[in-house]
Image (cartoon, rainbow, N blue to C red):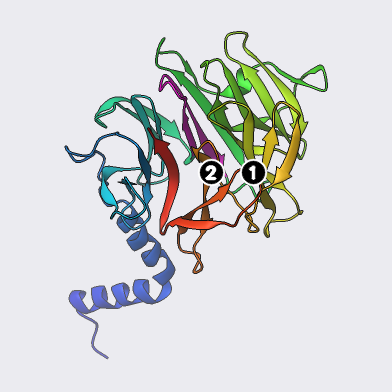
Amino acid sequence: MNALSPRARLAVVLLAVLLLGGGSLGYVLRARQQAAPQQTTADASFTLAGPRLYYRDGDTGRVAYQADPTTAPVIGGPSCERFHAAGDTALCLQRRPGLPATADAVVLDRQLRETQRIALPGIPNRARVSASGRILAWTMFATGDSYATSAFSTRTSILNLNTGYLIKSMEQIPLTIDGTRYHAPDVNYWGVTFAADDNRFYATVATKGRTYLVQGDLAAWTATALRENVECPSLSPDNTRIAFKKRVTDGPDSPWRLYLLDLRTMTERPLAEPHSVDDQAAWLDDNTIGYALPTPDGHGTDLWSVPADGTGTPRLTVPGASSPVAVL
């Protein structure tokens, strides 16, 4: 039998690679697709102005807005995994291609021009800007990518634009639970929301399989647990109520319901959304709460809204969208 030529031997090797390593080849192709360049800057005419509803468009990954529910959406913002804005500032979390997972926290002005960029490890998860636009917070998944299991770890940072000071990890803040200073290696913070004074904040703390709503004081550098089973708080514009997701079942299937907490009475009530909401809700106005839900095919999310008083029914607000924020 004649020996194969070098060209033939190369063809055999390539065929074997394709047959035996199809999964790996597919992974490489997907990785290259995911690494495609993003639209990291906004179009020149795309700025923050109000009143408008801004959000992340699921088809393009770019920030879009609607000035009115009856008008067509305008897509022209930067590509963001998470987006939030208030005052004269926007925060865009941009995921970088490649492994391990990394991202950038990009600070933007009212013309959506970049003013600062901070490199981050992990997967973008939550973003918030205080009402003044001067205090920013973001949460990254350090490990894992879902709150539905215990196999995750987060890192939450706070940036003060007034002073330029960056708190790289909120785990540094002294924590009090049940009146006692608390220490544990498994403490995780996420889902920050700021009061109007740019000093008081609320966030979720998880430890020992429990979650707590904490109230923090940046100037005093303290955080105190207020109650259990509160995740991803979102403070109302009048600073008196918190929308949050509450765990209602154990396990990863439909674990949460959307609730509202009155900070004056510390009483809570469920909102009219019957589905499990894994999102940090946003106040679209004083009486309306917006949030993302998975699309029926599970390949994206839609924006929904519901009255904040527990009445009414959920309303589909923007199909194929996430990260809602009302800009005035």
Question: Which residue occupies 67% across, 40% down?
Answer: 260
Q: What stretch of residues is rendered in magenta?
A: 126-143
Residue at 56 percent across and 56 percent down: it is 314
Q: Is residue 138 left or right of residue 2?
A: right
Q: Is residue 101 magenta?
A: no
* Residue 157 in sight here: yes
Q: Secondary structure at mark 1?
A: loop
- Mark 2 → mark 1, Cα distance in angstroms: 9 Å
- In the picture, the quarter occupied by the C terminus is top left
Q: Amino acid at mark 2?
A: Thr
Q: Which residue is mark 1?
A: 309
**Could you tell me which residue is drawn at 40 percent across and 11 percent down?**
162
Q: Which mark is residue 288?
A: 2
Horizontal and vertical percent for residue 180? 82, 17
Mark 2, Cα crowd under 10 Å, few <14 / some 14-19 / many 20+, is some
Q: Is residue 137 magenta?
A: yes
